[in-house]
Image (spheres, rainbow, N blue to C red):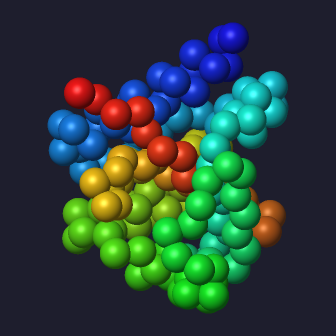
Amino acid sequence: MKARLLLASLCVVCSTASVFGMDAPVVLPVAPESVKKVANVDRYLRFVLNRNYEITEYGSKNMKFFADPDEFVGKKITESLPLNKHDKKAITRGLKGAKASNGETEHLVPYTLDNIRFCAGIKYIEKKKKFSVKVTQSATIE
């Protein structure tokens, strides 16, 4: 129950950041394993990026990709989606911040695609020199 409340709060944080036009990603400590296990029940897209921000692996659970994987594998994450300039910069800042933290924090970056709000949780995996990006659809604020 606590984990679900935490996840709902994260979506609200992402949505609120987007509504208020916050440029900086929200930074949180990496969630403990117990929270991660519960988080995997939700709908999400998962991407693995190399150090050049190119998508090398992907997966999903109960969510569809915006495009066919052949269209985004091998391309930079910021170039594979039709994001506005603001969102591209926010995702790039999130990637740089995650790398600078050496995997100790998860950077949450809100963005919008086709008028739908999403939140990208970005972590850097130092040992593998790769990024893990988990995308969830954010709660809608009316």
Image position, residue 11 (x, y; %):
46, 33
Judge by depth and name the residue closer to the eye, 57 or 137. Answer: 137
**Residue at figure coordinates x 28%, y 54% from the top left:** 115
- Which quadrant is the C terminus positioned in? top left
In-image side of 11 versus 104 (left or right) = left
In-image side of 36 versus 26 (left or right) = right
> Which corner quadrant of the image does residue 51 belong to?
bottom right
Residue 129 can be seen in this image: no
- Report how many numbered discs are placed on residues in the image: 0
Above or below, 26 against 111 in this view is above
Above or below, 7 against 5 in this view is below
**Residue at figure coordinates x 61%, y 54% from the top left:** 63
- Which quadrant is the N terminus positioned in? top right
Q: Work out which residue is located at the far left of the displayed protein and give it.
A: 20
**Residue at figure coordinates x 71%, y 51% from the top left:** 61
**Residue at figure coordinates x 49%, y 62% from the top left:** 95
Image position, residue 42 (x, y; %):
67, 37
Image position, residue 89 (x, y; %):
30, 66
Residue 58 can be seen in this image: yes
Image position, residue 4 (x, y; %):
63, 20
> Which corner quadrant of the image does residue 92 belong to?
bottom left
Above or below, 20 against 3 in this view is below
